[in-house]
Image (cartoon, rainbow, N blue to C red):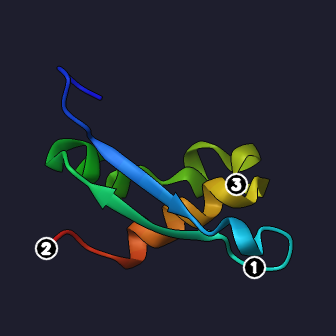
Amino acid sequence: MLDGDPVIDLLFDATDIEQGDFFFRAVESNNDLSMGLRAFNPAQDMKDWMSVRPIKSVFDWLHKNPLP
């Protein structure tokens, strides 16, 4: 939250954690944050973190789904 307003909600499918790609989608409420997350390249900036599947899934989704 930023000044009492939501900025992003990350939705996960808890029924498929072990086998699947359990990150479902982001519900974005703050354009500045959304643009910043898309500009951030974790593959270059945080290589060690990219081995953590939920983090990779979130950034993959953000890069595949442009802002409307």
Q: Does the residue at mark 1 contact the one at mark 2 (Cβ under 8 Å)? A: no
1 vs 3, front mark = 1
| Identity of the residue drawn at 18% across and 45% down | 30
1 vs 2, front mark = 1
55 or 2, nearer to the observer: 2
Tell me the element at label 2: loop
Three-letter amino acid code at disc 3? Met
The residue identified by callout 1 is 20
| Identity of the residue drawn at 48% across and 54% down | 41
| Rendered image quadrant of residue 1 | top left
The mark that comes first in sequence, 3 or 2, is 3
Identify the mark at residue 2; answer none if there is no mark.
Answer: none
7 or 37, nearer to the observer: 7
42 or 66, nearer to the observer: 66
| Rendered image quadrant of residue 20 | bottom right
Q: CA distance from mark 1 to mark 3?
A: 17 Å
The residue identified by callout 2 is 68
